[in-house]
Image: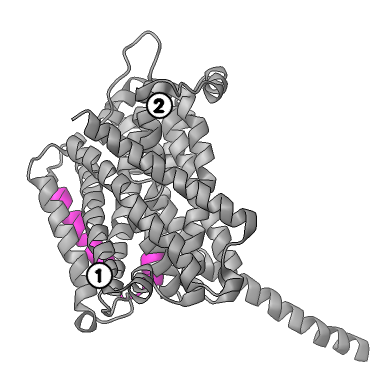
Amino acid sequence: MKNEESTLAESTPQNRSLWRSVFLTLLAIGPGLTVMLADTDAGSIITAAQSGVQWKYSLVLPQLLLIPFLYVIQEMTVRLGIVTGKGHGELIRIHFGNGWAWLSALTLIVSVVGALVTEYAALSGVAQMLGISPWFVVPSAMLILMGIFLSGSYVRVEKIALVVGLFEVFFILAAFLMKPDLGSMGRGLIHQPLGNPDYRFLLAANVGAVIMPWMIFYQQGAVVEKKLSKKALQSARWDTALGAVLTQVIMIAVVITAAAVARPETQAPSISSAGDLIRALSPVLGSWGALLVIGFGMLGAGLIAAIVVSAAGAWGLGEAFGLKSSFSSKLKDAKAFYGVFVVVNLVAGAVVLSGVNLTEITVDVEVMNALLLPLVLGFLLLIERKALPKEYRMKGFWRFSTWVLTLVVISFGLYMAWDVFHHL
């Protein structure tokens, strides 16, 4: 009897430690997956589809290689948020002053509005294929987002975002339904026509869109909002790594789907909207099949991105100006936080409903994000050195690799922006 009691007593602390580890892991999962699924937004889906149509499977390899880019950059935001307990905008204000904080916040808002325009445009495009007016879809989407945003709990917002974002797996289903040629796919992995300027531009468009300015603000704000402790750091890293893999699998699925559409005997279709992608897949999947698969995928991509982008803008502006910004705050106590959400969504919705050329706006948004990369990523690297204690800073080969990968992202983004301006 004594032996049994002794064994029970000895095992109890171990069980408690195990349950504590499980709890910390479950608590940390969410921000990385959410922001990565939002990264595969409507604009990214269209870029991947156009890549597959024009260059078939050649851009599958770059999508695979982009996984470490995504991880190392977003991992910095995780460490900064968990260790300092402060958002990105607040750290810029503390270490570089109000001027730089306000500049970063204002450029973030411009990026947020641009991203929201592409999300609403995609949702509107799918709705029009169903014969539904954009004047119904866009206001309805805004009201749904407002209800989610005013739920009073970040965890609730995150859960809703993840459920909606998982609709993106329909893109993976589309890739299987298209029955791609595995031999052509293998040859495409090897064939990289880097000498062709058109290929380089699409490559730059994919790389330059890997890190959006709002991604950094969102994930750092999310880990702060969840009050993750340093013990949860490793779990948060796994969350980020899993998200990086999943989002790139979805991008690869879109490239494969579009590549399978581009038959040798037919002219490759031009894909610049959700409607173009649905029409391109219709001969293989049928009109309703293409509409359902791509429609659900775009719905998930657009809504999760709209949630994440809106939250990033509200957090970033509040942090930069030293204002209260939290989902747990009541409306009367955080008017600026909720006000930013309303304003950016109203402006984006108005742009979509104004009748302007949304295809051109999508290109402009990509170029704008590319131009913002040096500012956003530059601050991220500098803050990592200034804000973190020595034991949490990057060291040795990891630091060298992160700097190299970050500079590659900046270079490709600037190349894309230069190429667009050069051809104006």
Q: Foreground: 79 or 100? A: 100
Residue 63 appears in the figure: yes
In the figure, is residue 20 to the left or right of 62?
right
Q: Which mark is residue 99?
A: 1
Q: In this rendering, would 379 be left or right of 331?
A: right
Residue 30 in view in this figure: no
- Which segment is the magenta one? 136-160
Q: Regarding mark 2 in the picture, which secondary structure is present there? A: helix
First in sequence, mark 2 or 1: give its number.
2
Q: Residues within 10 Å of mark 1 (few under 14, many from 20)?
A: few
Q: Are marks 2 and 1 in contact (CB under 8 Å)?
A: no
Picture mark count: 2
Left or right of residue 421: residue 173: right
- Location of residue 395 with respect to 202 vertically, above or below: below
The residue closer to the viewer here, 303 or 173, is: 303
Q: Circle 1 — which element?
A: helix
Q: Quadrant of the N terminus?
A: bottom right
**Residue 128 at what x, y percent from top left?**
17, 37
* Residue at the image point whose x is 37% and y is 54% from the top: 164
Residue beneath disc 2: 52
**On screen, residue 113 above or below 319:** above
Q: CA distance from mark 2 to mark 1?
A: 43 Å
Residue 187 sits inside the magenta stretch: no
Q: Quadrant of residue 278?
A: top left
Image coordinates for residue 340, horizontal then vertical, percent:
20, 67
On whether residue 139 falls in the magenta region, the answer is: yes
Residues 368 and 265: in front is 368
Most frequent secondary structure within the magenta stretch: helix
Identify the amino acid type marked 2.
Gly
Seen from the viewer's position, the closer of residues 49 and 392 is 392
